[in-house]
Image (spheres, rainbow, N blue to C red):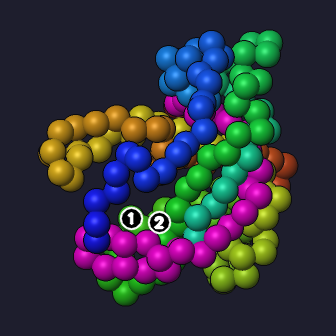
Amino acid sequence: MSQLGWDEFDIDAEKVTDEDVKDIDEGGDHPPIGLYLCEVVESTPKQINFNAYACIGTQLKFKIDQVLEIEAKLVEGDEGEKYEGKFLFDDVAFAHEKEKAGMAKRRKYIALRLGLIRPNQIIVKSMWRDDVIGKKVIIRTVENKYKDKKTQQEKIGRPNVGFFDGYHYADKSDQAATEEEWGDI
């Protein structure tokens, strides 16, 4: 393959506006660590590769309807408006013979919080393909620390949906009522 030279192509001029600079300096318009009322708008099958195995799963796409908290502070006024209509994503790995118990627990946790199943029901593919669309859920995003595979340096990426604390019921109307006891206070 031959090397491409600068004289072999043209590009259009591109203006960088004050608004572009402000957006870049403020970290872009990606939703920060927070709590968001969301609706599932897409569920796309995908292969998920782990160190020990690969499996089929789904990538859930959530549209943010309302921002509830940013950086553990309640949102007031129109403070969260710029994130409404933006998207959050999370992968759910389907059952695999080599999966650890935690992966099965997370899948069941997500299915319960999304209202796809109730206790003693069976999770089936059509739930992830069809039934999940339109479901409302409160999503908690958390800090995304990871180790760069090339440099081995610890880095911080865009916030992720919390692994075991990222999903909360948006509609608790069909949940069993619990009575607080003095030991809970």
- Is residue 35 found inside the magenta-colored segment of the image? yes
Dot 1 crowding, Cα within 10 Å, few <14, some 14–19, many 20+: few
Residue identifier under label 2: 105
Range covered by the magenta-colored residues: 30-57
* Residue appearing at x 31%, y 79% in the figure: 53
Q: Is residue 173 above or below residue 184?
A: below
119 with respect to 65 (left or right): left
Q: Quadrant of the N terminus?
A: bottom left
**Separation of residues labelled 2 and 1 (CA atoms):** 5 Å
46 with respect to 176 (left or right): left
Q: What percent of the width, then of the height, locates residue 69?
A: 64, 24
Q: What percent of the width, then of the height, locates residue 110?
A: 59, 60
Of residue 89 and residue 119, the one placed in the foreground of this image is: 89
Quarter of the image where one finds residue 72? top right
Q: What percent of the width, then of the height, locates residue 136?
A: 78, 51
* Residue appearing at x 41%, y 47% in the figure: 7
Q: Amino acid at mark 1?
A: Gly
Secondary element at tag 1: helix
Tell whether label 1 touches label 2 (CB within 8 Å).
yes
Residue identifier under label 1: 102
Of residue 50 and residue 136, the one placed in the foreground of this image is: 50
Q: Is residue 91 above or below residue 152?
A: below
Characterize the magenta stretch by its predominant secondary structure: strand
Q: Is residue 161 visible?
A: yes
- Is residue 42 found inside the magenta-colored segment of the image? yes
* Residue appearing at x 80%, y 12% in the figure: 77
User: What is the residue that sits farthest to the front in this orientation?
Assistant: 7
Q: Amino acid at mark 2?
A: Lys
Of residue 54 and residue 100, the one placed in the foreground of this image is: 54
